[in-house]
Image (cartoon, rainbow, N blue to C red):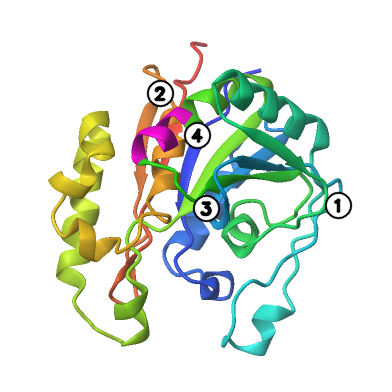
Amino acid sequence: MTRTPALFISHGSPMFALEPGLLGPKLQQLGAGLRDVRAVLMVSPHWQTLHKVRVLATSEPETIHDFGGFPPPLYELQYPAPGAPDDAAEAARLLRDAGFEVELDPRRGRDHGAWVPMRHLLPDARLPVFQISMPNDLSTDAALELGRALSPLRDAGVLVVGSGSLTHNLYEFRQHIDDPEYAQQFADWIADAVARNDIDALVDYRRRAPHAARAHPTEEHYLPLLVALGASDEHDRARRIEGGLTYDTLSMDSYAWESPAPAS
């Protein structure tokens, strides 16, 4: 079995489920080409817990519509993929071994940060999909370590996915402030740092990246990028999946860290 990729997917707003834009078809193409994946682990900013990490161990998670004020068809969407209790238990063990305080959660469903991008990546919902929460005090360093702890799951056929948004200024989104230049500059800085594998810069983005505080007034939508980066290794090839800008403020750029193809 080849090593599964580590992914960062920008899910933007819940409307991405109905408006695939540039990124949706690219995710569907990526998903169609995945091999040897038997389960998916998602880390979403929409599940934050107090201090400790919680791991979704539900066998049949419900689809949570954790948003308001959107068109009615959005609330009718479902993503009925099964859960993965055994993989959840193994993820919990790896995290405990890395020093994280962990609890299994046998009741929670999947939030839109998980099911919205999965509707594009794996629309048939046949593979098991489980989630891991982010502690509400998670730092950039700790997000990287969280991904590193989960990296061995890739050898067992688990696709590790950080779901967030490359830029996420909800005030400007809601106020319809059109200023795509700053968002694109931030996205391009991230692309350059990822291409150079400049881990220090990506962890210290708050001081080094242009418009960092404007692109991310709060950090929870950036941290899944570091989780995916942490789950990568030195042999992976980093690939930018350009998603353009949604509403002129939300960058939908996403990333895949993929193992080189085996020699034929």
**Residue 69 painted magenta:** no
Earlier along the polypeptide chain: callout 2 or callout 1?
1
Using the image, tell me which numbered label, if any, was put on residue 236: 2
Where residue 244 appears, as percent x and y from the top left, is: 32, 64
Q: Is residue 79 above or below residue 254?
A: below
Q: Residue at x 13, y 55 (%)?
A: 210
Residue type of the residue flagged with mark 2 = Asp
Tell me whether the residue at label 4 lies in contact with that at label 2, contact meaning CB atoms closer than 8 angstroms: yes
Judge from the rendering whether residue 44 lies leftward or rightward of residue 64; answer left or right: left
Instruction: Report helix, strand or loop for mark 1.
Output: loop
Q: Is residue 201 left or right of residue 120?
A: left
* Marking on residue 6: 4
Q: Of the residues shown, which amino acid type is indicated by label 3?
A: Leu
Q: What residue did someone put label 1 on?
A: 60
Residue 194 lies, in percent from the top left, at 27, 36
Q: Would you identify the image quadrant in which residue 34 lies?
A: top right
